[in-house]
Image (spheres, helix red, strand yellow):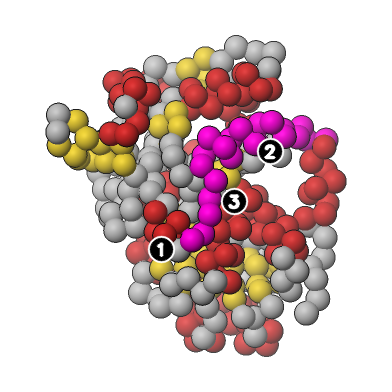
Amino acid sequence: MILLLGATGYVGRAFSAELRHRALPFMPLTRTAIDYTRFDVLFNFVRNTRPDFIINAAGYTGNPDVDACEVHRAETVQANTLLPQTVARVSYLTKTPWGHVSSGCIYSGAWVTRNGAERIERNLDQPEIRRLFETRPGQFRGFTEADEPNFSFRSPSSNFYSGTKALAEEALRWFDECYLWRPRLMFDEFDEPRNLLSKLQRHARILDGVHSLSHRADFVRSCLDLWERHGPFGTYNVVNPGAVTTRHIVERIKRLLKPAREFEFWEDTVEFLSAGTRAQRPHCILDPGRLLSLGIEMRPVEEALEHALANWRPPAANQEWLATSLKSPLSR
Ligand SMILES: NC(=O)c1ccc[n+]([C@@H]2O[C@H](COP(=O)([O-])OP(=O)(O)OC[C@H]3O[C@@H](n4cnc5c(N)ncnc54)[C@H](OP(=O)(O)O)[C@@H]3O)[C@@H](O)[C@H]2O)c1
């Protein structure tokens, strides 16, 4: 049996759907039923139920967006840094392997080759960098798991959300039987508030940049594949190979969904932040090479984007899928 924390969330619901699809018995936990954020409660629960694996898909990403994490700091630390440590201790004491949904937002930038030299370019939202990416994408290389996070409390500038996610990774690094799965901006065909493609259609103005992305179902499939195939524990960038600019995604949205609106862009981060935004948004490219080298497949990002937009489901059409994904789990 697999124990799923944060089962009601955007990522948690996708894990539920995939676990059901694989006919893997699982138990979704929600704080209203059992307060899994408390060590004693979780420890006793795991000791009594003896799961084979724990998935931590719980966290605080801010509502309506990451700006809220700058205000609700205690909640952000509690959910993103303290809770993963609680799960790690429980899993250590009960000898239960587990996987934690971390994030690629602990990086800013990419490795970029210019004038024959490769170095980290931190700001992928600069107009000249975006132009370089559009003309010479081969000069950009993503961060690997060996690169130290550079958008954390230890770096010159970070937002609060990213800081708490990076701090959790630092603490979890020392636990042996743990996967750290790093997704980047998530999307799929279901129109809902946390979907990047939905957000872009609703934002009054958009900040352009270069990104890695994770298709939500591809992400959870790869995480479960890693565990089912006994992949080595450790950190994995779980993103669709390739990178895209926000402007490119918007062009695809215009072409495939034909929305009845114009899209406006911020000039750059300086203009974006001067309009009252609280949290700096990192743009980054991650290299999923470690995951792919184990034979675990992620579709190229262009293919996953095309598929999501070609199968776009407006909110009403999602209700049936949501109801299915939230049904009670299979029994053992
Ligand atoms: N969405 C993305 O694009 C994305 C990208 C990268 C990483 N992530 C990571 O994926 C994880 C899940 O994100 P999500 O998008 O699924 O978020 P979400 O939709 O807000 O769901 C998070 C779930 O976490 C649980 N939770 C536990 N403590 C919480 C707290 N203090 N405040 C709020 N919720 C709390 C809640 O479940 P219960 O109340 O049922 O227990 C909630 O449903 C997070 O760790 C996030 O950092 C998400």
Q: Secondary structure at mark 2?
A: loop
**Residue at x 51% of width, y 74% of height:** 230
Verify whether residue 7 appears in magenta: no
**Residue at x 28% of width, y 34% of height:** 139
Q: Is residue 182 above or below residue 180?
A: above
Q: Which residues are magenta?
A: 295-316
Residue that label 1 marks: 235
Q: Is residue 328 above or below residue 285?
A: below
**Residue at x 14% of width, y 33% of height:** 116
- Quarter of the rendering occupied by the N terminus: bottom right
What is the x, y in percent for residue 67? 49, 38
Q: Secondary structure at mark 1?
A: strand
Q: Are marks 1 and 2 in contact (CB under 8 Å)?
A: no
Residue that label 2 marks: 189
In the visual, does 314 lie left or right of 176?
Answer: right
Residue 218 numbered mark, or none: 3
Q: In terms of depth relative to the viewer, which is nearer, 152 or 74?
A: 152
- Quarter of the rendering occupied by the C terminus: bottom right
Q: Secondary structure at mark 3?
A: helix
Residue 191 numbered mark, or none: none
Verify whether residue 304 appears in magenta: yes
